Image: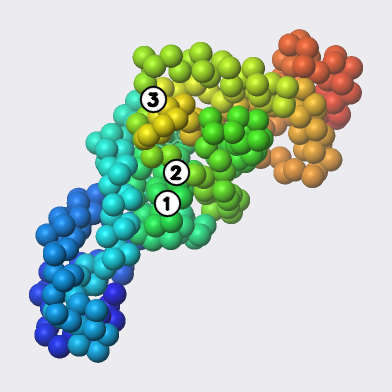
Amino acid sequence: MLRAKSVGRISPPSTDVARAEQLSRAPMLAIKSVEHMKTYFNRHSTERKGKGWNSKTHPSAERVAWDLNGGDEGRAWVVRVLAGRYRANPEVLDEQYAPPSVAHEVAACAERALSAGAREPLTYIGAGMTGIVFVDANGIGYKVYRGLYDSMRSMAVNEFEWLTVAAQVLGSRVVHPLCFDRDNLVLGREFIQGKPGGWASNLSDHHRAIEREMLPHGWTAPEFKEDSYVFPEGSPKTPVLVDASMAHRVGDVLLAYVDEIITGVRPWLDERPPDLGFVLRVEASNGTITRDDANVRLLTLEQELA
Ligand SMILES: Nc1ncnc2c1ncn2[C@@H]1O[C@H](COP(=O)(O)OP(=O)(O)O)[C@@H](O)[C@H]1O
Ligand SMILES: [Mg+2]
């Protein structure tokens, strides 16, 4: 983009240069800038027909300006981003869960998304209690966990593992995970273009059905929140679950999980022996594991404490 500046014979207007500098620098753009880019591309697209548009050696001033503003690649990106505009707007922040302090965290979280492989520029999509979500230039949704401490770490690991199983079991009813960066705590998943669901849309029935299908695979459903589903644009209209926090392991999957912690295959994160003891007792009484299977492990956990 900046290369175009030196190729042009005529000095481009400073607004075009400013935009180019902003695009080359910014890890993310304010949605306002993206809207201005759209206005620019709309206003100037007729200039493509002008002389020198396709000349490599003597491009027209209009072509130089176009490239400084992001060029064809930039225009395609703007169209993609603005298709989800109403959610890529700080005003639709999940007010119920997101503390007002989220604005201060956005830049640092964007940096972590980039370290995890996101391609700039990033657009802010939304935030909840656990994560800040961006969509990158490739159209991948990156959830950056808000904080690098143990309980966030275990939430992130659990969400990634849940989504990995759920993608097999539930198909297009759940967002598919694409990558997970354990050091930066960044989860890359499909980005679903559409409208977030509300309490009114009977999503709780849908959520119960998801739980019924996940239980035989060793997991409850995640916590139910009204904005955890997105209704995708176009058909089919099936809501897609995008937020998978707070699901619990049951049955054999729970036993394997406890065994992995006891034997050191998995690190102890925020859960302590009494926490694991609690879930073992709950699931023994729910009947997803036997009392004997629970008791052996409870004994080991008690020795852990001694
Ligand atoms: N993959 C995605 N596609 C589309 N929108 C998403 C996606 N992931 C998150 N969002 C939006 O961002 C918001 C916050 O993400 P979420 O995973 O719910 O974080 P938290 O666990 O903190 O609530 C969601 O409510 C949703 O509106
Ligand atoms: Mg959420």
- Give above or below for 42 relative to 60: above
* Mark 1, residue position: 139
Q: Residues within 10 Å of mark 3 (few under 14, many from 20)?
A: many
State the separation of the CA atoms marked 1 and 2. 6 Å
Figure quadrant of residue 183? bottom right
Q: Amino acid at mark 1?
A: Gly
- Residue 19 showing in the rendered view: yes
- Residue 17 showing in the rendered view: no
Q: Mark 2 CB in 8 Å range of ligand 1? A: yes
Residue at left 27%, top 42%? 85
The reply to whether the C-beta atoms of the residues labelled 1 and 2 are less than 8 Å apart is: yes
Residue at left 45%, top 30%? 236
* Mark 3, residue position: 197
Give whichever of discs 1 and 2 has the lower sequence position. 1
Residue 233 x %, y %: 37, 35
Q: Amino acid at mark 2?
A: Phe
Q: Nearer the viewer, residue 282 or 21?
A: 21
- Give above or below for 60 relative to 138: below
Q: Amino acid at mark 3?
A: Gly
Residue at left 58%, top 17%? 209
* Mark 2, residue position: 191
Q: Is residue 160 left or right of residue 267?
A: left
